[in-house]
Amino acid sequence: MAANFWTSSHYKQLLDQEDVDVVQPLDREKGITLEEFKLIKMQMASYISKLAQNVKVRQRVVATAVTYMRRFYTRKSMTEYDPHLVAPTCLYLASKAEESTVQARLLPFYIKKIYADEKYRYEVKDILEMEMKILEALNYYLVVFHPYRSLVQLLQDVGMNDMNMIPFAW
């Protein structure tokens, strides 16, 4: 991982909010509005969080997965790439990048538990194929800087060395 945010690929690829919230032309043709686009991304972030709770990964992995999904949809269309497959694949990829690996075979099992709908039944091979598409769309830039380490350092600086003293849940 890059040690310096200012020289990292994360910094070099930062986008303004108006660049992130752009509906792809193919999605616009299908009638997806900006509001619907934002709603779908929020629902998929929630979906990633539910899956993460089931497979028991850290919050940092969830944050990385959501970042990957948002980066992916700045370049690709939601109508071309199903968010219900992209979201768990981003979680799988993030778990690898954050060294908290989730077995790929667990994801289809938990997807089936969350969604009873046959339409969202994906197999391991679907996730592994989508992983390569996501990697290509992200240009293989997987480094994501999160504020978590800085927050812990800030709390230590303030004198809250004991994690039990922290007034919020990790």
Image: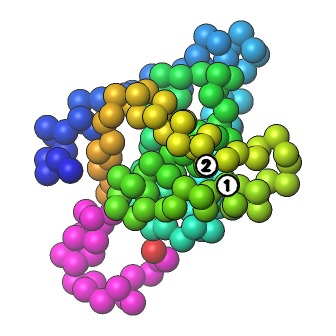
Q: Are marks 2 and 1 in contact (CB under 8 Å)?
A: yes
Q: Quadrant of residue 35?
A: top right
- Using residue 7 as the reference point, say whether residue 151 is left or right of it: right
Q: CA distance from mark 2 to mark 1?
A: 7 Å
Q: Quadrant of residue 79?
A: top right
Give neighbour class at mark 1: few <14, some 14-19, many 20+ (Cα, 10 Å): many
Compared with residue 56, is residue 68 higher up or lower down, i.e. above or below?
Answer: above
User: Residue 33: image x %, image y %?
Assistant: 70, 21
The residue indicated by pointer 2 is 124
The residue indicated by pointer 1 is 108
The structure residue drawn at horizontal position 29% and vertical position 45%, both measured from the top left corner, is 143
User: Residue 125: image x %, image y %?
Assistant: 60, 43
Q: Amino acid at mark 2?
A: Val
Magenta span: predominant SS is helix
Point out the stretch of residues depicted in magenta.
Answer: 148-169
On whether residue 162 falls in the magenta region, the answer is yes
